[in-house]
Amino acid sequence: MNKLPIQAWRSTVASGPNLRRSVSKIGGAASNSFLPHEKRRESSTGVATCPHLADQEETQPSASRVHSTAEWQNALPYSQIPGPKPIPILGNTWRLMPIIGQYTISDVANISSLLHERYGRIVRFGGLIGRPDLLFIYDADEIEKCYRSEGPTPFRPSMPSLVKYKSVVRKDFFGELGGVVGVHGEPWRQFRSRVQKPVLQLSTIRRYLQPLEVITEDFLVRCEQLLDENQELPEDFDNEIHKWSLECIGRVALDTRLGCLESNLKPDSEPQQIIDAAKYALRNVATLELKAPYWRYFPTPLWTRYVKNMNFFVGVCMKYIQSATERLKIQDPSLRAGEPSLVEKVILSEKDEKIATIMALDLILVGIDTISMAVCSMLYQLATRPEEQQKVHEELKRLLPDANTPLTIPLLDQMHHLKAFIKEVFRMYSTVIGNGRTLMEDSVICGYQVPKGVQAVFPTIVTGNMEEYVTDAATFRPERWLKPQHGGVPGKLHPFASLPYGYGARMCLGRRFADLEMQILLAKLLRNYKLEYNHKPLDYAVTFMYAPDGPLRFKMTRV
């Protein structure tokens, strides 16, 4: 799943006190008080733009063709775009600094809403020390225009820590094969083109239905074992969801069962080490992006641990990809039956273990947190919306009168309300709070002249909840996603207001696997169990993703 420029946003901020929820206060300024993440470039308009576009200056004319159009000439200058005003020296960074700042990273979703309320459909968040300007766009039509006008190699902001790891620390391993995460331009396009077909083929997706169903059944057995005397799951149930997600991704990306769902794992066992490494990534990688990036200049303890953690993941990927290669070598091609696995397809087509290894690493890095946190959100919404849960349950009872009926693709295709529920959760509580692009050309956006190099942010968490684009947006209504023959209701639903997987060439590569995993889990769970949540309501907050902030102590009973 696409990871917003929450990474772009995170790279501009440091932790601070709780948000003072005052729209008037955001009218001041916000900048960055820590060491620059990278040298900023100033465009010809004096705008802080992305330094990674510097290499393209030689091949692109300085005056874009757009300058000669009437639209550009009639547009207002970039400097007039409304937004928080920077102060001398600290710019706009002070707002997110410890002690004196206004906001914390967990309030990013609220801040995005406040910016829209205070300034309107386009907001310039500049004066960010060491970072390009952030341009928040709350107009779904303009977002659509930005997406549809991008070229074959869109530039999406990425985590600087991962970029450094791939391009500097382990350049010996990655070389020119950076993968699809943290890579841009032609190297990104070439790598994606080599793995995209097998990853997105429907035949590949169908092959994993039964293996992922087995993993999910094992997970539900473990859930039953974890129930206390009140039939409630433990406070750290989110960790169990992470294990399920990791086991699913391992089966897809590494062609193996990792063993993460086993009970009583020894601390030095490989499954436990994998769980610990994934948990570390989920809990601590954001710190590298949030706080002063001293790791850019010398190896801090956190950076050293991060590198060790990443090396461990690379080693695990190499081990299982090599195992798959050995199996193929000793296997008689004439005896191969059925659809090859994803790993086998990539190895057979590319004849290069490294490509399969890097693909697996990227799928693991971007998949664990996004899928697991999305599931946390969906389960919380199901448990707190019993009427909606009952609708899904009734649909599943009709399609699966025998609870032990194996799932099939045709059966999943008929689970209209279940899939509508998933889409509605993404609309109202988007796990990834937005998408983004670094503009590759000068553009006119919302009537303003915007220079290339600016980082455009498309805040899905806001646009998906705007009345301009969604009828009765504040109401949770899965039926809005259904066709009339399946019980759908009429109303506005702008196709670019809610895009959990992004759009275009850089749309989430693993989206079909993510959908499959979530649909299997919800189908198996809600056909056989009822979920309840009988505790204090949870707020949503951004840790690494946007999800319920607190213990998920669900009551789980068989039906």
Image (cartoon, grey):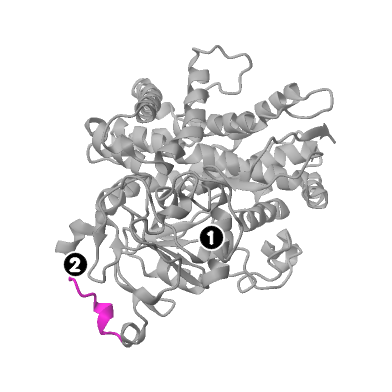
Quadrant assignment for the C terminus: top right
Q: Main secondary structure of the magenta part?
A: loop
- Whether residue 498 appears in this view of the structure is no
Q: Earlier in the sequence, mark 2 or mark 1?
A: 2
The residue depicted at 41 percent of the width and 42 percent of the height is 289
In the rendered image, the vertical position of residue 45 relative to residue 185, given as above or below: below
What stretch of residues is rendered in magenta? 60-69
Say whether residue 48 is left or right of residue 99: left
- Residue nearest the observer in this picture, 507 or 128: 128
Observer-side mark, 2 or 1, equals 1
Looking at the rendering, which quadrant does residue 74 occupy? bottom left
Residue, far left:
58
- Residue nearest the observer in this picture, 175 or 213: 175
The residue depicted at 59 percent of the width and 41 percent of the height is 373
Say whether residue 71 is left or right of residue 261: left
Q: Which residue is mark 1?
A: 112
Graded by Cα atoms within 10 Å as few (under 14), some (14 to 19) or many (20 or more), the crowding at tag 1 reads: many
Contact between labelled residues 1 and 2, with CB atoms less than 8 Å apart = no
Residue 460 image point, x, y percent: 54, 60
Q: Which residue is mark 2?
A: 60
